[in-house]
Amino acid sequence: MKEPLEQNDQYLILKATQGESEAFGLLFDKYSDKIYRFIYYKVASKELAEDLSSQCFLKAWEQIVAGQKVNSFQAWVYKIARNLVVDYYRTREREELPLIYQEAEEESNAPKLNPEDNLNPEELEKLLLNLRSEVREIVILKYIEELSIKEIAKIVDKSAGNVRVILHRALKDLQDKI
Amino acid sequence: MPQRLFEQLNKLQSVKPDLNWQSQIRSSLVTRARIDTLDKQLSFTDRLSLFLMVFYKKYLPSPIKMASAFVALVVISGTSIMAQAEYLPGRPLYSVKRGFENVEFAFAVTPEKETQLHLKHAKKRQDEAVKIAADASNQAQKIENLNIVIKSMEQNIVAAKSGLEIVKDASDASSSDNQKTVALAKEITKSTNNAIETLDQVQSSASAELTKTVDEAKSLAEDANSVSLKVLVDNADQNATTESQPSVSTEEVKGFISQKLERSEEKIKQAQVLTNTATDASLNSKNDVNLKDAVQKNTEAQVAVKEAKNLLNSNNLPQALEKVEQASNITKESTGALSKIIEVKDGVSGSSSDGGLKSTSTTPKVEPKKDGLNILNYDDSGISSQVNQTATYTEQVDLNQ
């Protein structure tokens, strides 16, 4: 189904820069859930995810208004979110080890799961958090946000082939663990 | 399988931020965007991008639509091409062809265009009539098909004539309007000349059952021809007095009048043949009077033709046309009267014949009546007297004099 013009990212960006501020509101409506989830599963803190998500959209707007040319708003805004998380950990690196990594280290043994079972969200979250950060973000984008390999490759700055390999390895690791 | 576990991850789409937070951030972002763009103007490139985006999205069809449109176009044009080749009215493709022709009228926005379309369709019907007439497979079907196409052609010619009258009435004194009217009149004159010629051709190759239809069509084509020729003559006359640039040359108009004149002469010749036949058929004194009258009219028509020729030679086009019209009308009257005499004669011979013997004439028969309302009166025995005609009745005026 073809996307209506009024929901097209490029159109909304141009409209927002033209003075129709509500257009940027529409972009926020379209991507806020996704960006929040992406950050949340990287930082494992609701408050922190909200804070970083706000920063992400603000930064996006600042760059748009400064004249930044955006080809794919989705890939671009995920990249901003990703960089914000990286920056966040970089600044916190020396202070403390993030909770997520602590958990990952503590629970080096994967949860005992039956692959045929229907898991609840808590179990799925555990499964997800057990993955390495680099793998996890790709799994999130692929299986939660349901993006294509090509779109994921753009966001994580890797080739499509590389993304496929990472996903394949993630599946293999998981199989070994369970 | 781990794959199945991963696939269950989409359940985590239910994880969403707090609605209050969302609304608060949205509101602050929109405010920020409003403030930042208060005195900001879009660059030319951005404005162009926006325009192109709107243009492409709104006015350019999607590839699927384009592909569908292409397929539809191929199917429609294919059917249209196949239908164009169909000339037999009974066939399904013929209806398709006529349907396409009707659609064409939706695009004819001016009376000129509509008239031209009628002429174009009249030409198609002529071509069809020629093809049908040449087909000797099924005589009954052939007559039926010819009747359909000739009637249709007739309608087109009548509509073209009305179209010319509308265009003529609507045109003001401007030279462009006048030129349009004249051009249309010229087209109608040519088209009706061709139609009459085709009808003659069809008549000669088809059976006598078609005579009535062809005669009617020819008569209507002649009417339309007279109207259009009148427009051309008036224009040529006007140009001669004002010495302005003619829209149609005098020689061209003379050529058209000559064609009409030739047809009148042909009709007079046919009337003379009918006179001879009617002379044999004359049965009583009243019939004799009618015959005399018809012969008189024929002579008058010949004189009118002769005068028309002289007027045409002296470039007096309006009067030449008038004389040709006069000759045609007189011939029409005499032909009508002569035909009736012959029909009655045929009717008598048919009814008095022994048993199943029938008249070979294909013209409608007029039953003789005893009340004297008909042309001929019969006595109670049904036997009518033969009147010997004098040579005067068959005297002919030498047209070449």
Image: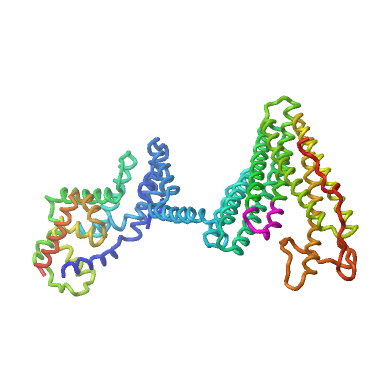
Tell me where residue A65 sits by quadrant.
Answer: top left
Q: Residue A52: horizontal and vertical position, in percent? A: 25, 52
Q: How is the image coloured?
A: rainbow
Q: Residue at x 65, y 53 (%)?
A: B203
Q: Vertically, is B314 above or below A26? A: above
- Front residue of B370 and A62: B370
Give the left or right position of residue B17, taking residue A12 as reference: left
Q: Is residue B205 magenta?
A: yes
Q: Does the magenta stretch mainly form a helix, a strand or a loop?
A: helix
- Front residue of B221 and A141: B221
Q: Residue B289: horizontal and vertical position, in percent? A: 89, 54
Q: Vertically, is B288 above or below B185? A: below
Quarter of the picture containing the C terminus of chain B is: top right
Q: Quick check: can you spot residue B326? A: no
Q: Quick check: can you spot residue B230? A: yes
Q: Residue furthest top?
A: B243
Q: Which residues are magenta?
A: B204-217
Q: Is residue B129 magenta?
A: no
